[in-house]
Image: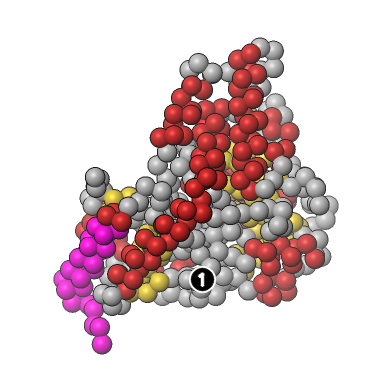
Amino acid sequence: MLQLPVYLDHNSTTPCDPRVVEEMLPYFSEKFGNAASRTHSFGWIAEEAVETARLQLAGLINADKTEIVFTSGATESDNLALKGVFENYAFKGNHIITATTEHKAVLDTCKHIENLGGEVTYLNVDDDGRIDVDELEKNIRPTTILIAIMYANNETGVIQPIKEISTIAKKNGVLFFCDAAQAVGKIKIDVIEEGIDLMAFTAHKIYGPKGVGALYVRRRNPRVKLIAQMDGGGHERNMRSGTLNVPAIVGFSKACTLCTDDMQHEAKRISMLRDKLENSLLQIGGVSINGNKSHRMPHVTNLSFKDTIANTLMMRFKNKVAVSSGSACTSALPEPSYVLKAMGLNDALANASLRVALGRFTTEEDIDLAIQEIVKAVESARVENKLYNPL
């Protein structure tokens, strides 16, 4: 049965899968122990659940379980990776390379590092939203300690040339950090094969609970060392102190299990629905897809509707369709998307863009309603404003 509003903002967050909730429930009451309590069975049960989860997360990305550090989410993981490397490798240098289209969790952390005396190069992207790997290599200095490029963009779904980036990093003896919050669990990621040294991801993007994430930290070839950003007990191998959120970690584990089982089928199903949405909306004219159409996530599209304003469109169908005009972290800001601006869109087109992100529970009926509502909103907005000229 169709439920309104239809939720198509899965890049912002995903609903917690009922199977995840069921798995978590005992750890709120019956199995409530602290995983750091080593003197009784309550603690042992909690610790066993955490280590099982660590193994499950590692398996999803082809890592070793000892390389998984639990955090409160991808933002904390980003901070730990960037600041931890900057402080620990200060003897080598103070230069970081990133991109203008990174998530604010990376960009704001880089600004903080600049305030501490670090040097950061912000690479531009092309019209498709991808960096130029030749430009990346040209910007490497003797003092470069880290390359920080996200796996898939949170606004456009565009996937960066990860293997090429890691090859350049290895050749120059530079660590490679990847924010993969939008990619893990949705497409296959192999940190060994793809040469990733540090990688952030989070549960609430893959139908797990909010408030728990992870950082992959490579232990060999090379062994990556970080300075902790949170002190107080030496938890998580002295990289992240604090009592572990056992119920959320258990939920994260179950979410990863479900992704492992369903990833290939889901990617195919969702991409077909996404393509149907795009093809239908392109028919109304004055609509363009933002970002590389060959290298992108299967569940997301970013569309500009010429001679409209995205926020006005969303007001017209907000009770029937839930989408966004960009990242949830910047949706309250009146400025046009900095990601789309970096890709060369002018203010008018950037302000006329919607991000539509499908998910596990999205049906064809949902997409049909979304098409209907978006078309109706665009056409009525254009008539009302007398803006659109198809010629």
User: Horizontal and vertical percent for residue 9?
Assistant: 38, 52
Give residue 331's quadrant in the image: bottom left
**Up/down of 237 relative to 146, above or below:** above
- Looking at the figure, which quarter contains the N terminus? top left
Which stretch did the figure color magenta?
A: 367-391
Whether residue 120 is visible, yes or no, is no
Q: Nearer the viewer, residue 379 or 297?
A: 297
- Comparing 156 with 370, the one in front is 370
Q: Residue at x 68, y 59 (%)?
A: 194
In the drawing, does residue 31 fall left or right of residue 224?
left
Instruction: Write down the residue under mark 1.
Output: 294
Q: Quadrant of residue 227?
A: top right
- Residue at figure coordinates x 59%, y 65% from the top left: 160
Label 1, residues with CA under 10 Å away: few <14, some 14-19, many ≥20 = few
Residue 329 location, x and y as percent?
A: 45, 51
* Most frequent secondary structure within the magenta stretch: helix
**Considering the numbered disc 1 on the image, is that residue within a helix, a strand or a loop?**
loop
In the picture shown, does residue 283 fall above or below 317? Answer: below
**x%, y% of residue 178?**
63, 55
